[in-house]
């Protein structure tokens, strides 16, 4: 096994709970390897730090799979990790549809596994996971089968742009015999049609599952606006209790799916339109009791944080001005580069400019099947804040 020795002063990320070794942290490499191989990582004092897979094509040169010197990185390790991940989900979420494996948070960096009823969707984002695809798929299916969970098929959605940074092509397709990729799921009592082959991420936004549920109390008998509605996650949850809800998205396909989902549930208090949210908020003359903002990530790198902050500021300021007295604002950010304190400061700045006073009702994160690991800031990516907005 090749040995990677870090420079003096490096390895602090690993010490605080991280799993990544960057290329500029490495002092020297001893031994031959092929990209994807398991290597040993040591400090400049030759203290053991862990074992993981290596890839020269990535700035994240090594991703650790174990910190235990006596633990071999073999098929048994993957089996244990997958079993641990499933057993955790059974304790914290409803598992009909959930994220089963969340990359670093489950000590399986580069791997995502989602379950939609009786279908599994795999996402292999790194070379180290991609070369072990067969082992992972087989063992994941076996772990569920041993727990009497019936899975009719598996699909691969390794079409994220992050694979390009690993020197990999973007791919998707069946990992088992073909099946109908249109899956009907139940989220908090709402029926949703998910297409695992064409939908966002691996099919839909499972990380917002309990945030969708959390808004129902404030939406009861209210007039609701859901911006960036996508396929209607927040809007349809609101529809279970609200007077009426309007969902807006720039994607014609997403809006058609939202309408279809509304019809599946027999809702008569929903409307969905195709429009640019920024334009709609600019020209809107109506007032709402509840406004929901769940935009896509405005930044996916540190270099564009400033522009992203402007985008969040613009939509939140406009939304506050369209709320009825003592209305509610539900505002989200899924960018890991806008941390919680920064996002809150943006909202506070909007309130100052709009001459509003905010009551923070809930400061929420992603669903527990997307666990946040303390010390791994990248896992704490989703902010969902619920405010009551009052005049000063």
Image: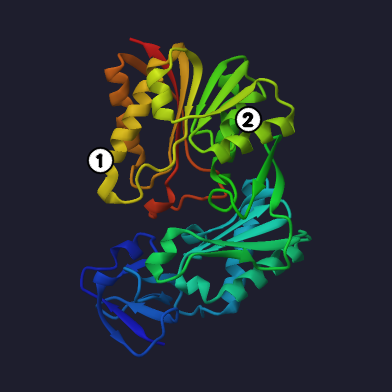
The x, y position of residue 182, in whole percent, is 70, 50
Task: Compare residues 207 and 294 and report the one nearer the observer.
Answer: 294
The relative height of residue 283 versus residue 198 in the rendered view (above or below) is above
Task: Compare residues 178 and 190 and report the one nearer the observer.
Answer: 178
Whether residue 66 is visible to the viewer of this picture, yes or no, is no
Task: Compare residues 43 and 339 and report the one nearer the observer.
Answer: 339
Q: Earlier in the sequence, mark 2 or mark 1?
A: 2
User: In the current view of this chain or complex, which residue is farthest to the left?
Assistant: 8
Residue at figure coordinates x 51%, y 80% from the top left = 72
Residue at figure coordinates x 35%, y 70% from the top left = 58
Render colour scheme? rainbow
Q: Quadrant of the N terminus?
A: bottom left
The x, y position of residue 332, in whole percent, is 44, 35
The relative height of residue 210 versus residue 97 in the rendered view (above or below) is above
The x, y position of residue 282, in whole percent, is 37, 21
* Residue 152 relative to residue 187: left or right: right
Disc 1 designates what residue? 306
User: Which disc, if any, is residue 236?
Assistant: 2
């Amino acid at each position: 096994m090749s040995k990677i020795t870090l420079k003096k002063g490096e390895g602090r990320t690993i010490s605080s709970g991280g799993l990544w070794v960057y290329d500029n942290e490495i002092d020297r490499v001893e031994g031959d390897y092929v990209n994807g191989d398991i290597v040993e990582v040591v400090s400049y004092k030759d203290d053991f730090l862990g074992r993981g897979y290596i890839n020269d094509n990535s700035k994240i040169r090594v991703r650790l799979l174990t910190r235990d010197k006596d633990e071999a990185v073999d098929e048994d390790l993957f089996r244990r990790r997958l079993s641990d991940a499933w057993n955790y989900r059974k304790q914290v979420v409803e598992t009909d549809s959930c994220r089963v494996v969340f990359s670093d948070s489950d000590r399986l960096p580069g791997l995502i596994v989602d379950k939609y009823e009786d279908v599994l969707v795999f996402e292999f984002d790194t070379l180290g996971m991609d070369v072990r695809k067969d082992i992972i798929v087989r063992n994941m299916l076996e772990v569920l089968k041993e727990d009497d969970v019936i899975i009719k098929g598996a699909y691969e959605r390794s079409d994220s742009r992050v694979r390009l940074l690993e020197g990999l092509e973007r791919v998707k397709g069946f990992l088992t015999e073909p099946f109908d990729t249109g899956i009907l799921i139940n989220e908090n009592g709402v029926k949703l049609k998910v297409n695992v082959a064409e939908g966002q991420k691996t099919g839909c936004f499972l990380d917002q599952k309990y945030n969708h549920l959390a808004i129902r109390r404030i939406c009861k008998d209210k007039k609701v606006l859901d911006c960036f509605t996508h396929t209607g996650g927040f809007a349809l949850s609101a529809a279970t209790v609200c007077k009426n809800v309007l969902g807006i998205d720039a994607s014609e396909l997403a809006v058609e799916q939202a309408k279809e989902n509304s019809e599946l549930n027999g809702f008569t208090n929903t409307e969905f339109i195709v429009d640019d949210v920024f334009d709609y908020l600019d020209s809107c003359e109506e007032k709402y009791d509840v406004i929901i903002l769940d935009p896509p990530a405005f930044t996916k790198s540190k270099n564009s944080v400033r522009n992203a902050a402007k985008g969040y500021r613009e939509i939140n300021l406009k939304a506050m001005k369209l709320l009825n007295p003592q209305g509610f604002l539900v505002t989200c950010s899924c960018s890991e580069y806008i941390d919680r304190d920064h996002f809150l400061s943006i909202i506070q700045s909007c309130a100052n400019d709009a001459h509003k006073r905010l009551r923070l009702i809930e400061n929420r994160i992603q669903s527990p099947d997307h666990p946040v690991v303390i010390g791994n800031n990248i896992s704490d990516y989703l902010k969902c804040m619920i405010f009551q907005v009052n005049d000063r």
